[in-house]
Image (cartoon, grey):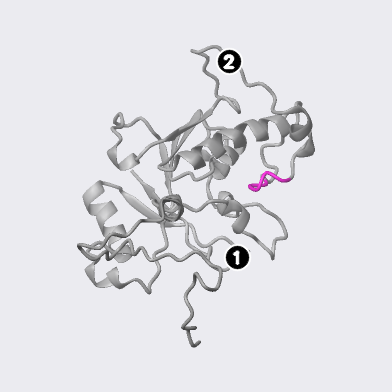
Amino acid sequence: MKRSNSSSEEQGFPQKKANYNKVKEGTNIKEDTYHKEEIIEKLSEKAYGNYNAYYTARRLPKAKCNIDPRIDLLDSALFKDKCVLDIGCNSGNITVALAKKKQPKHIHGVDIDESLIKKAENNVRLVYSLSNPQGDDSEEPFDLTLASHHFPLSMTHMFGFLPMNAPPDFRSTTFPYNVSFKAVDWTKERVEKEKYDTILARAKHVDPSLDADEDLQFRPEHYKDYLLNEVGFKSFTDLGIPSNEDKGFSRPVILYTK
């Protein structure tokens, strides 16, 4: 496309001359502060590689439902009456599903993104408010998009969430009191030894077109050897790839056991 020789001011558009990457010394350029802050804000939204509305995007057209098939691959014995840590929990949909259906003693979800943790905390209140007061069948599929429950979603819009008040030292292994969330950089967090029985972590997909590939020293093919020989896991089990996964989400579920 041929660029017009007329200036942007002549065309009625605000002229933006500031180049934030390369500003020549000695030039007196007035920065468009609003535009710059807008760029910074948009970049900060993806500062950690987070995935907002992940469970809305994770669609399962073949199953015609919003049930995450990865949950079915996980033995309930890994969670029942266990202390569970979910690293990189995003908006907490999986964490909440496990807390409700797998009956852990407690499950703690962590994510570096504070905005996602706030959504996770709201999701607990939402699921609790829409649950059957008589109790749900623990084997019933769990809708991770939170769109289908015992009560219609409109109930929370009309009447708000049900209260979840409990004494400060109250401890319960039943939902919703068996789940908690925290915004934290887990790589810098100190953890009590043997505090958790089961730990969940998600693999992150890296765009193969990135030029950093040649500089990577720790690659996916090294994970198994490192976890078994360096970290101290005793066994490795490939649980397979969940069926009915949409394109882009078809990844194996791996179980490492100490």
What amino acid type should be assigned to the residue bearing mark 1? Asp
Q: Residue furthest bottom?
A: 2
Left or right of residue 26, residue 137 in this image:
right
Q: Nearer the viewer, residue 60 or 90?
A: 90
Q: Residue at x 20, y 63 (%)?
A: 25
**Residue at the disc numbered 1:** 246
Q: Position of residue 191 (x, y in %)?
A: 31, 32
Residue 177: image x %, image y %? 56, 24
Q: Secondary structure at mark 2?
A: loop
Q: Tag 1's secondary structure?
A: loop
Residue lying at the far front of the rendered structure: 10
Give the labeled residue for mark 2. 166
Seen in the image, is 27 located left or right of residue 47? left
Q: Quadrant of the C terminus?
A: top left
Instruction: Name the residue located 45 percent from the left edge and 39 percent from the top edge.
Output: 114
Q: Residues in magenta?
A: 143-147
Give how far across and how far down residue 66 sits, in percent. 67, 53
